[in-house]
Amino acid sequence: MKRLLSALDARFMASAPPERLATVRFLCGAFAVGYFILRGHVMADFRHAPGVFAPVGIASVLSSPLPAALPFVIYLLTLGAGVAFTLGFRFRLSGPLFALLSLWVTSYRNSWGMIFHNDNLLVMHLIVLGGCDAAAALSFDAGRRGPVVDGPRFGWPLKLLSILTALAYVLAGVAKLKGTGLSWLHGDVLRNYIAYDALRKLQIGSFASPLAPYLVQVEWPFAALSIMTMVLELVGPVVIWFPRLALVWALGLWGFHLGVLVSMAIAFPYPLSGIAFAPLFRCERVWQLGGLRRVRGRLFPARPV
């Protein structure tokens, strides 16, 4: 047992450079701000009948909708805190503030008839980043601090972010097994679901994948795709323990999300962006690419990577 605990401690508390955690902060923050801007029409405007309001998450403290102008004000505060979070400006305040505001605006939006589960992983990542020292480098705050050396305080948040990503997919795999059992592996469930999704969207006048009617006519690939999907979703914890598998795992899941987009016109923006998998890799190397080196030099006090 002591050997296992020592191994777990060595894995979870491994040292990492501050630039790696800071790069994840920058990527997640920039994505979140852009995502919230693009989704502003459903995150800031709730002029619906009060009967539609069914509070979930932290919005459950409410018994009735907020005054119409207040969600818009909170939304603007969220964007402002998000910019500060991304740039690492007054991060001790902006970090937790943006995380909590993101949790609120997504919970409040989900309280109006439909729950968007694809927001959950992004918000959980923001909460972890907002609660750790993710602005020790590549930030406005870093200019007011002395030299920062690599250490476990930059490593454990990355490991926790990776674990959260893995667990999100494990839960998706367990949900499939709970809902359909091992019949999911036969491929018929996936094939029928694609057909049902396309037919339902066509009936209600929504946009359906133009490829779906052709894809469901071919039977043989669906068993292999169903098995591959299940394996990718359930092996996440193994990947966390053996990081060398991370690239294959991340590319497989990215391909899975691309397949969902093509076959059902359903987008999961955070995984599709690749940023959901950034904590698994040495993502600070992105700043060495061409123009990004100049961007880094203009935005943040430089420390060699």
Image (cartoon, rainbow, N blue to C red):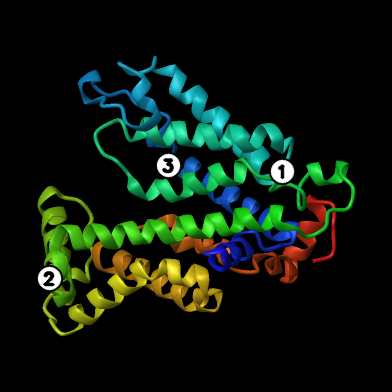
Nearer to us in this view, 136 or 28: 136
Cα–Cα span, label 2 and label 3 = 36 Å
Name the residue beneath numbered marker 3. 39
Label 3 is placed on what type of residue? Arg
Q: Quadrant of residue 178?
A: bottom left
Element at label 1: loop
Q: Quadrant of residue 160?
A: bottom right
Q: Is residue 13 above or below residue 188?
A: above
Cα–Cα span, label 2 and label 1 = 48 Å
Label 1 is placed on what type of residue? Gly
Residue 33, can we see it? no
Q: Residue at x 60, y 39 (%)?
A: 82
Q: Which mark is residue 183?
A: 2
Label 2 is placed on what type of residue? Ser
Counting residues from the start of the chain, the first of labels 1 and 3 encountered is 3
* Number of marks in the rendered image: 3
Q: Is residue 80 above or below residue 116?
A: above
Q: Nearer the viewer, mark 1 or mark 3?
A: 1
| Residue sitting farthest toward the right | 146
